[in-house]
Image: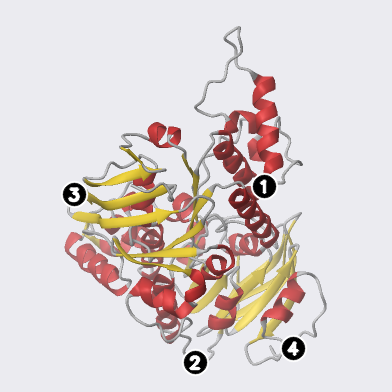
Amino acid sequence: MSQQYVIELKHITKKFPGVVAMRNMHIQIKPGEIHGLVGENGAGKSTLIKVLTGVHIPEEGEIYVEGKRHVFRNPVQAREAGIACVYQELNIVKMLPVVDNVFMGRKVTNKFGLLDYPYMHEETKKALAALGHTEIDTRMECGKLGVGQQQMVEIAKAITQNAKLIIMDEPTSSLGEQEVQQLVETVRRLKDRGIAILFVSHKLEELFELCERVTVMRDGEHILTRNIADMNEDMLIEAMVGRTLDNQYPKIPTTRGMQVLRAEKLSQIGVIKDVSFEAYAGEILAFAGLVGAGRTETMRAIFGAEKPDSGKLFIKGKEVRFNSPGEAIKAGMAFLTEDRKGQGLVLSESVKTNLIMANMKDYRKGPLLDHTRINEVSQKSVSSLRIKTPTIQEVVVQLSGGNQQKVVIGKWINSDADIYLFDEPTRGIDVGAKIEVYNVMNKLLQEGKCIIMVSSELPEVLGMADRVIVMREGRVMADIPRESPHFNQNDIMKAAWGGEIENDDHRH
């Protein structure tokens, strides 16, 4: 057994009732290597992470750390062997200070048997300094830090545990652009210290920027491991989905219909200011801007989840005032929230229940629920959205992130709304699943629906939108139709940063 690898998995198989989540999987990671891991949702990436971190015990196969065989029966054993993970949903206790989060689960005592805080503060400061983050106060409550800084606390925790391998699971999915750049620098610093990184991401451009080698998984199996220099995006996508994707953004031309929504000078103190726009049937209106520009807040104000202080809202020419999301749903609106776990799903319920939740009254037969019809509708949603689930009875918490996202989309499609608010509809889902989401959007447009989409991914905005509204600090900076010469990445970014572009007055 050679010691050239910090981690080596051989012939790993993991089964759950009714499903083989991983079959004969193998991966080798060198010390100080940034190794990419990609695959569609449900490809087995999360299972691999859980096997590496001791959460799942595989039925077959072997794990070697620096040439020595290990059997991890729990996360503590994996941690002691030098494996740490920074999860997409951060494991931070927000009420506790940074130092307590870094030393969570470890007892460091002085000669009197008390917690040795001077030592803990010192080690935490050292770890943060090694990451280039001397600005983070070790006494500060973690909840008061930004998401990027909270992530640095998690990485500092791994460093103080002398981690040999740090797994980063979708580390940039909720970071702004500057925070992403800081993370990239941090990852390179860790590499320089000889720490290996397993970088799990759906953002292919990040893999090409950071990784030396990449491993592709599909349907729980190893498909390939290659030097990233020998690959391009198309080759990676083909390996992930098992087919070529001729067009990542399958936009179809549609005819714009009537105006279905109009906002006039919506304002909420400290959040949004004088936001005005119109949205039409048969079009995708995208909202672009930097994190914190007020896009989600605008959607929440439209949907009755927050109450604007002033301004007016019209649906099909008639003024409306929503005191709750329930009233907005009755008026024909659907809101796919960015936070699918917290606001989009009931994780403890089945796929079937979640799929009809937004519109249960339509599935009644007298006083009772019509289960035959619910089963039919659920099966149809599962097949049309290609939701990977053993059955419609499966509890949603068991599905991968992308499949959970598809359940949320299915839920709102089954509500038969007229206006769909999609907030980051493809965040954290893979290329193949994204295309399925775009095809669903196309179908809604063909049915004459209106889609308002918040997206931080400019290629997605340019690929799918008919018109884009750019926001900055709660205000509308630009309203750019697809046919405008300003409908490009540079001008949208310029407006998002506060630069002037001539606004096309195409609307009247």
Asked if disc 1 and disc 2 are in contact, CB closer than 8 Å, the reply is: no
Disc ID at residue 377: none
| 106 to 30, vertically: above or below | above
Depth-wise, is mark 1 or mark 4 nearer the camera?
1
Quadrant where the C terminus is found in the figure: bottom right
Residue 288 in percent (x, y) is at 65, 71
Q: Amino acid at mark 3?
A: Pro
Residue 344 in percent (x, y) is at 44, 56
Between disc 1 and disc 2, whose residue precedes? 1
User: Dot 2: within a 10 Å radius of its alpha carbon, few (fewer than 14), some, or many (20 or more) residues?
Assistant: few
Seen in the image, is 347 located left or right of residue 204?
left
Q: How far is the residue under mark 1 from the one under mark 4?
A: 37 Å
Residue under pointer 2: 253
Between disc 4 and disc 2, whose residue precedes? 2
Residue under pointer 3: 17
Residue 505 in percent (x, y) is at 74, 88
User: Dot 3: within a 10 Å radius of its alpha carbon, few (fewer than 14), some, or many (20 or more) residues?
Assistant: few
Disc ID at residue 146: 1
Q: Is residue 318 visible?
A: no
The residue drawn where x is 20% and y is 68% is 376
Q: How far is the residue under mark 2 from the one under mark 3?
A: 44 Å
Seen in the image, is 211 located left or right of residue 122?
left
Q: Nearer the viewer, residue 213 or 237?
A: 213
Q: How far is the residue under mark 1 from the one under mark 2?
A: 40 Å
Depth-wise, is mark 2 or mark 3 nearer the camera?
3
Q: How far is the residue under mark 1 from the one under mark 3?
A: 40 Å
Q: How far is the residue under mark 3 from the one under mark 4?
A: 58 Å
Residue under pointer 4: 505
